[in-house]
Amino acid sequence: MTALLFLEQTLNGLQLGVTLFLMAAGLTLVFGIMNMVNLAHGSLYMMGAFFAATFVGWTGSFFLALPLAVAATFVLGLAVETLALRTLYGRDHLDQVLATFGLILFFNELVKIVWGPVSIFMDVPKALSGRVELIPGAPYPVYRLAVLAVGLAVAAGLWWLIARTRTGMLIRAGASNREMVGALGVDIKRLYTLVFALGAALAALAGVMAGPIYVVEIGMGDSMLIKTFVVIVIGGIGSIRGAFVAALIVGTVDTFGRVLPAQFGLPAAIAEMAIYILMAAVLFWKPAGLFGGRA
Amino acid sequence: MKRRTLLAGLAGASALPMLGAPAIGQAAGVKIGLITTQSGPNAGLGREMVDGFNLGLRHAGGRLGGAATELVLGDDQFRPDAGKALAERMVQRDRVDIVTGVIFSNIMLAMADTVLRDRRGVFFINSNAGPSELAGKDCHPNFFSVSWQNDNTHEAMGQHMTNANIRRVYLMTPNYPAGRDALAGFKRFFKGEIAGEVYTQLGQTDYAAELAALRAARPDATYIFYPGGMGVAYIRQYGQLGLMQSIPLFAPSFSADQTILPGVGEAAIGMFSSTFWSESLGNPQNERFVRDFEASYNRIPSPYAAQSYDTAMLIDSALKATNGSIADKNAFRNAVRAANFNSVRGPFKFNANHFPIQNYYLTQIGRDERGRLVNQMRGVIFSAHGDAYAAQCRMRNA
């Protein structure tokens, strides 16, 4: 592998990493604060993409559709939390897994009824449709660079929210000891709803941005969800900083894991295992994850 | 529990009186189990199978071969275990006479024994998956494939790229049985050099890393086998990297048909594909099929729909020959083997292993007069082409 190709693959890895981070941020907060396993997080990613595809059709503009879809999924997150998930916080993880798996089936079927069973088209916005030759001989799609930039900007915004605002303080407090936060008179129910909807909006943002590159179809969030769980386990459950670092690591390892084995004549199955081997290794030396506060 | 049945009566009210028990001297009717993928990312393919079959049933007047026809629908959920359980239920409880509709080879191989080993002599007349096992050593008197053998479409493109004198080709496919069959088929007829052979994860939709490696390998062309959403994602990312002009992309129909094109958009224009059938193939029965399919379902049919439609027409022709009865298995089997029907693909006959001998065409994606993306005919690659496994088949006399 030449140095230039190495650079290009690193860029690919980081771009996958920030997409994973947008998914992981919400999932790790919900897991860390509410102690809730939410398998339906991938469905929110999917709903964001489908909303955006529809809004692009209505408004004709990707840049209008993006905030609309994120807002719509935020509202959807509020509804899902209030109607379905609120009753599950006190239950054990198996109940939560079963119920949220049910939500996956519900959303998949909903999409099939509303949008039909075939993937739908969502174009790269004209302004971002070109390529730039950052690396000589390897023109890189501007859109993918934009995804990378948005992901980094959101990461910075989240850091500010968590570290510098009152809401963020409550979220951090909730992640380390929720009973105490409730005992101190914070309206924990409202905090839960807000955090869940925020997570839904971030997942939607990831889904909307993925729409023009990948494919807007039923179940599109499922494969992302598995990688996202790997990210939050490696990063440490409840830690945004952990999710960020782990997402970039997982994105990069996955990217190189997919191209390196072939160069050395190793079987393709290695690519599928790379991130799980990484996760096993991290759990062996740091059972709580890289930035996990609680064991 | 209420069964998900769809009576032929839906297609035409004329069939409704047949709901009652058959009178003596009347044909007992035929019950067909259509097992296909109706949920998840591949639900669109299942819809093609169901709609294609229903259109065939309607063209046959709601009664295949004049027999009262009952269609039982089942969703395999894209899971081999669910497909097998469904096959067991249909064969043992619903007592269907014929099973059809299975899209994926791994699901079909999981259920083949259940269907073919039933003592009643159930027929498996499949309309998509055509794994090498059932074409070769495991061929079975009651198994017929109305589509192709898995390797065929890829063999055709291998032949075309050899004819076109393309020297270095980069190959990519998902890492699963049909993917490996595909590249084996391609390489059987491609005489040039393989610049790279990459197997990706099934269901993967981000190809940035693999495409960067592809570009660095500087091949003359790329051949892929990515069905469904994987194909949509791959072709778009190929276009977004600007590779379409510098490294032309070739694919089988599974990555270029009407289940893919609406999701890909303009990026696909100019792409070549190989296929046994195309929406623009000109013969009277195909023109009627495409016209009526569009009128009924408001979209252009894909090869999946064409295969399923042909399966209904084949069963119709066989039941006509047996006066609407499937009771005499030998008579019905011989009638199916005769393939005495007008296929929408043109010439069609069965090989000794009950897989098709048919033509394979080269198509190119362009716009039709209404501006929609379609596969336009560019020529014949193979005439009356069979498969490589027929020689390994020792067909028992059942």
Image (cartoon, rainbow, N blue to C red):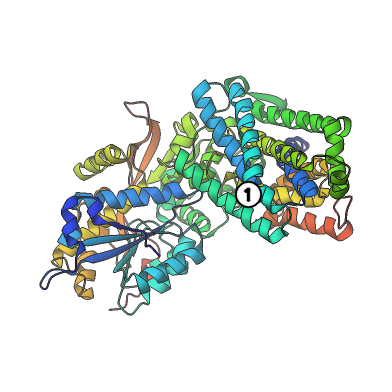
Q: Is residue B167 above or below residue B105?
A: above
Furthest residue in direction top, as rendered: A127
Please identify the quadrant where the N terminus of chain A is shown.
Answer: top right
Q: Chain of mark 1?
A: A
Furthest residue in direction left, as rendered: B25
- Residue at position x 62%, y 55% from top? A99
Q: Camera-side residue: A101 or B170?
A: A101
Viewed as shown, does residue B313 lie left or right of A3?
left
Viewed as shown, does residue B183 lie left or right of A170?
left
Please identify the quadrant where the C terminus of chain A is shown.
Answer: bottom right
Viewed as shown, does residue B229 lie left or right of B56?
right
Q: Position of residue B116 (x, y in %)?
A: 36, 73
Q: Quadrant of residue B292?
A: top left
Viewed as shown, does residue B340 lie left or right of A285?
left
- Residue at position x 81%, y 30% from top? A156
Q: Camera-side residue: B83 or A9?
A: B83
- Residue at position x 76%, y 47% from top? A253
Could one spot residue B123 in this view of the protein?
Answer: yes
Q: Is residue B174 above or below residue A243?
A: below
Q: Quadrant of residue B298?
A: top left
Q: Quadrant of residue A282?
A: bottom right
**Crowding at label 1, few (<14), some or many (≥20) Cα neighbours within 10 Å?**
few
Secondary element type, mark 1: helix
Reading the image, the residue beneath label 1 is A223
- Name the amino acid, label 1: Ser
Could one spot residue B393 in this view of the protein?
Answer: no
- Residue at position x 53%, y 26% from top? A56
Q: Position of residue B138 (x, y in %)?
A: 41, 73
Q: Position of residue A174 (x, y in %)?
A: 84, 44
